[in-house]
């Protein structure tokens, strides 16, 4: 049995609505499976065409989670931390702004900022309903800042071929540079709006949630608080076990059905045995309706593993079109398909039905392309680099009870990939060094404040999240039935009561932050 199956694989159909980032070799698969992408969505809207800088974009109406924003650009410095001539080069960094609800600078109305993830910022704006639904209550200005090297915020004149060419040009892509970007944009925007006293609250989900928390810690003069949803800031340097991620996926499926768990667990060996037979690959291809252009056991296993991983991650209580169109409680639906007596003892028929919950819930797909390398949100080039430098998130270990074959995390696989592709060595200890992670409860209790860490325990990334309150103002909100940053999604009439209560509590905490800020502001007036 192949030990490569630590797999959050990558067919990264973590396109958060279709990031089909299919790996070309096993090592790349291992690297990319570490991605902590994430963003909430109850709708996915196709990206608008190229817009003028200040053109208003209207994306839907109120009843269908419509949002609007203006697209703007900020002239950003290439390197915030050095003073050589190259450092002073600039690029155009995109941000989106919505002033529909803003009370303006005369009332010091707040500014809510989304700290962009690894992808196009319009994609994240379209999928962050919580901010749009909360803004009217606080008369808040909404700003979504795009992460450098993603979307339209590409250095070197916007030339992606140059920007992604090698380690010399990619070397300016890091979380620290991104945070400095955000601080610069926020302060410049406040100055231009004559809103120096308007408080800023930052929001983010997954990697964006990590950035939100880190911005609050690194730039407390810029943001008075942060909502960090599903932010696995403890998933580094063996602080969290490498077995935790897949253990949670295993528990998600096992909690629905013991038979479902057992069928998936034993299926890997059956796939391997079938592939080894004469004509075995063709049997597998037909069983799973794989397109005729390419077939391999490794890719098929990765395709299945991706479906289980991302279905567990986005096990939302309402129908979504987030990564792909899926029903409410998709893990339960997968297990229903596997447990369906109509499929008898045909394991492959059961797995195909389960995988179709993730890949083909609409029923429109006629076959599945295992080597689809589409990247509609522009994640791959930048994230491949980040996963080779500082984003060394540990997710690839499997215990004997895992839904995937038992395996240990292998740092050497990542090292070889990064040396081969970029001629660099990863720095697995840098993030904990730069931002802190070890003994975080003891450390942040001494100096941190005003951070909400939300985690849903059905989300495999929750194992690397902050799950206990650190202080009265650094709080953990944990939802037993929650999935990946479900709190940031647009609300629906079908939302369960626990989710409504999570959002109410977040709003209440943010309200207290703002009240304290205005009280302090009055004291110094």
Image (tube, rainbow, N blue to C red):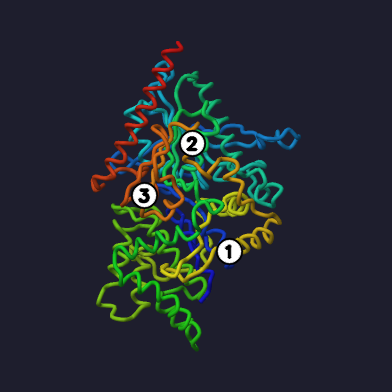
- Residue 246 disc label: none
Task: Identify the residue shown where x is 59% and y is 50%.
Answer: 386
Asked if the residues shown at circle 1 and circle 3 are in contact, with their CB atoms under 8 angstroms apart, the answer is: no
Q: Can residue 498 be seen here? A: yes
Q: Residues within 10 Å of mark 1 (few under 14, many from 20)?
A: some
> Label 3, on which residue?
456
Q: Which residue is mark 2?
A: 444
Q: Earlier in the sequence, mark 2 or mark 1?
A: 1
Q: Where residue 102 appears, x then y in whole percent?
A: 39, 25
Badge 2 marks a residue whose secondary structure is helix
Q: Nearer the viewer, residue 429 or 225?
A: 429
Which quarter shows the C terminus?
Answer: top left
Q: Nearer the viewer, residue 461 or 300?
A: 461
* Residue placed under numbered mark 1 in the picture: 410
Residue 366 position, x and y percent, is 39, 70
Q: Secondary structure at mark 1?
A: loop
- Identity of the residue drawn at 43% across and 52% down: 463
Camera-nearest residue between 440 and 456 = 440
Going from N to C along the chain, the mark reached first, 2 or 3, is 2
Q: Earlier along the polypeptide chain: callout 1 or callout 3?
A: 1
The residue sitting at the right extreme is 85
Q: Nearer the viewer, mark 2 or mark 3?
A: 2
In percent of width and height, residue 473 lies at 40, 32
In the image, what residue occupies the spot 27% across and 68% down?
Answer: 336
Other residues around mark 3 within 10 Å, as few (<14) / some (14–19) / many (≥20): many
Q: State the separation of the CA atoms marked 2 and 3.
A: 22 Å
User: 230 or 472: nearer the eye?
Assistant: 472
Side (left or right) of 494 relative to 247: left
Q: How far is the residue under mark 2 from the one under mark 1?
A: 31 Å
Crowding at dot 2, Cα within 10 Å, few <14 / some 14-19 / many 20+, comes out as some
Q: Pinpoint residue 262: horizontal percent, then vertical percent.
A: 35, 73
């Amino acid at each position: 049995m192949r030990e490569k199956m630590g797999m959050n694989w990558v067919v990264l159909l973590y396109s958060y609505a279709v990031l089909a980032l299919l790996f070309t070799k096993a090592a790349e698969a291992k690297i990319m499976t570490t991605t902590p992408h994430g963003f909430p969505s109850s709708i996915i809207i196709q990206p608008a065409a190229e817009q003028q800088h200040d053109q208003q974009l209207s994306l839907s109406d109120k009843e269908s989670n419509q949002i609007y924003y203006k697209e703007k650009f900020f002239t950003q410095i290439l390197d915030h931390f050095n003073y050589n001539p190259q450092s002073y080069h600039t690029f155009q960094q995109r941000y989106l702004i919505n002033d529909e609800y803003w009370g303006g600078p005369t009332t010091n109305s707040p500014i809510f900022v989304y700290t962009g993830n690894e992808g196009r910022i319009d994609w994240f704006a379209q999928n962050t309903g919580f901010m749009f639904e909360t803004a009217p209550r606080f008369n808040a200005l909404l700003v979504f800042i795009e992460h450098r090297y993603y979307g339209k915020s590409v250095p070197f004149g916007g030339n992606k071929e140059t920007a992604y060419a090698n380690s010399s040009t990619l070397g300016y892509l890091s979380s620290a540079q991104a945070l400095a970007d955000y601080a610069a944009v926020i302060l410049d925007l406040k100055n231009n709006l004559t809103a120096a006293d308007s408080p800023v609250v930052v929001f983010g989900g997954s990697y964006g949630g990590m950035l939100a928390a880190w911005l609050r810690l690194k730039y407390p003069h810029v943001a008075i608080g942060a909502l960090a949803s599903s932010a696995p800031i403890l998933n580094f340097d063996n602080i969290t076990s490498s077995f935790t991620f897949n253990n949670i996926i295993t528990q998600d499926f096992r909690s629905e059905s013991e038979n479902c768990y057992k069928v998936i667990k034993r299926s890997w060996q059956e796939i391997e045995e079938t592939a080894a037979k004469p004509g075995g690959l063709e049997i597998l291809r037909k069983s799973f309706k794989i397109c005729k252009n390419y077939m391999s056991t490794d890719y098929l296993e990765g395709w299945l593993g991706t479906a289980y991983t991302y279905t567990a991650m986005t096990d939302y209580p309402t129908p979504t079109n987030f990564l792909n169109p899926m029903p409410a409680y998709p893990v339960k639906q997968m297990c229903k398909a596997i447990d369906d007596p109509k499929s008898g003892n045909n394991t492959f028929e059961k797995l195909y039905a389960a995988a179709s919950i993730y890949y083909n819930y609409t029923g429109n797909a006629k076959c599945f392309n295992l080597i689809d390398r589409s990247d509609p949100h522009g994640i791959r080039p930048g994230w491949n680099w980040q996963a080779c430098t500082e984003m060394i998130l540990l997710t690839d270990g499997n215990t004997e009870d895992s839904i995937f074959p038992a395996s240990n995390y292998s740092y050497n696989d990542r090292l070889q990939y990064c040396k081969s592709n970029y001629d660099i060595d990863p720095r697995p200890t840098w993030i904990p060094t730069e931002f802190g992670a070890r003994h975080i409860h003891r450390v942040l209790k001494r100096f941190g404040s005003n951070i909400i860490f939300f985690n849903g325990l059905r989300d495999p990334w929750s194992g690397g999240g902050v799950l206990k309150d650190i202080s009265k103002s650094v709080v953990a909100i944990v939802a037993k039935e929650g999935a990946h940053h479900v709190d940031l999604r647009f609300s629906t009439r079908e939302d369960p009561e626990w989710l409504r209560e999570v959002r109410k509590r977040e709003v209440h905490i943010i309200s207290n932050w703002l009240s304290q800020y205005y009280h302090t502001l009055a004291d110094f007036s």
